[in-house]
Image (cartoon, rainbow, N blue to C red):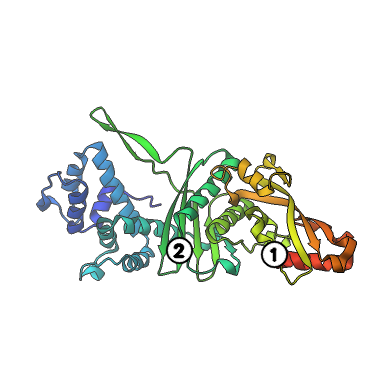
Amino acid sequence: MCTTYNTKKAFRSLSQVMQKAIFEKLAPELEIDWTKVKVRNVDHLYSRFLTLSDDLRGKVDSALYEIFVFAEHPVNATTLHSLIAQQGLIPPAEFDEWSIHDKAAWVFLQDETAWTQAARFAHIDRMTESLWFVQKLFNGGAGKVEYEDEHFDRLERGISEYIYNLEGRGKYCFIEYFERLALDKECFFLYLSDYPRNTMQWKGGNDFSRGIDKHAYEIVIVYDRKENHLSVRTTGPRAHKERLCQIWAETMRDTIIQDADLKKQAFDISGFKKGPDNIIVDPLSDVREAKVLMLEAGIAGNKGSRRVYEESDLDLYTQMRKELNPDRVPMSILEISCVKLRLQLDPKKYGRKQCQTVTVRPNSCNINSKDPGVQLVIMETLKSWGIVCA
């Protein structure tokens, strides 16, 4: 943030053409004698600015502040030019000769969406690399994906539920999403609020109006499609940032992160929460049938949320869907801590050993007590399902 901002300094940083354009857009009814406004002497302009209503004065000052802070950082010139090309904006012929302040003001006046992106990108570009927490995704998540509304809904619910269970706040998560085509990156700005984004604002004349509650974003997630890695900027310990990466990877790319802690696990059983489709039996293997008998699940960050679902008259996954409201408990924050399987082996080859019960946890599996031949079949089956970590 710029600490030397003041309104007069912002006026002086702009050409008179841009000064006029800003007032014509934000305060068109204000009368200004532009012959009295000089390059360095902006006292007349400032005195006229002070006659505006509190609402309009705040609106103009907020715009000037955004433009001034953006332009004060030289690195943002590159950001601005890349964004102009990305948005397909056509600047004036003499644009290259303008100051960075005038260029920023021009984008602000031309395209609100482009300016919002410019301000966001400028913020993250100023962050040093040491402030980012970086995680690699498995190759299955790489490249460009056309996201649907469902992806963003799931991510908002997943982050919101995780933060709410962890800190008791952030019930309403809102995401701003921007593509940076020039860098082949995707940017997600996450706002955490305890209330919906609508807020009642006093407008005078005994009237209220419903506006947007603009809180500052608390989490920034950047996905580099070329490098296939995820960068997160937020406060908190490593485990917290890691969990945010996991939620993003699962909801937006249907994959997982390649982090050190994950590699320490012997078995990745998270896929079992998605349903029985993940345990398809290879007809050429010795396994004839596979069935989930029990799942032990809980919400990340909430030790009291542990639930055990067992096969009974009602299908295990039907039980889960009945008990868990996907709007309240998104699958992205559900952690599977134990799964019990029944594997039916080829009766001709295994005889009395044809029915095997296998219990798998992230760091253990009860196959060591079984016959070596049966162990081999079970391990090959688990590998084919992608459960055994490399």
Question: Where residue 263 appears, x then y in whole percent?
Answer: 70, 63
Residue bearing mark 2: 146
Is 79 situated above or below 64? below
Q: Residue most toward the front?
A: 348
Left or right of 334, for residue 156? left
Most foreground residue, 250 or 14:
250
Q: Amino acid at mark 1?
A: Trp
Most foreground residue, 271 or 28:
271
Left or right of 297, for residue 120? left
Q: Where, by quadrant of the figure, is residue 104 drawn?
A: bottom left
Left or right of 50, for residue 155? right
Question: Where residue 18 appears, x then y in whole percent?
Answer: 20, 57
Q: Secondary structure at mark 2?
A: loop
Residue bearing mark 1: 385
Left or right of 173, for residue 273? right
Q: Amino acid at mark 2?
A: Glu
3D distance between C-alphas at marks 1 and 2? 27 Å
Most foreground residue, 216 or 158:
158
Question: Where residue 109 appears, x then y in whole percent?
Answer: 25, 56
Q: Where, by quadrant of the figure, is residue 303 drawn?
A: top right
Tell whether label 2 touches label 1 (CB within 8 Å): no
Q: Residue at x 74, y 64 (%)?
A: 382
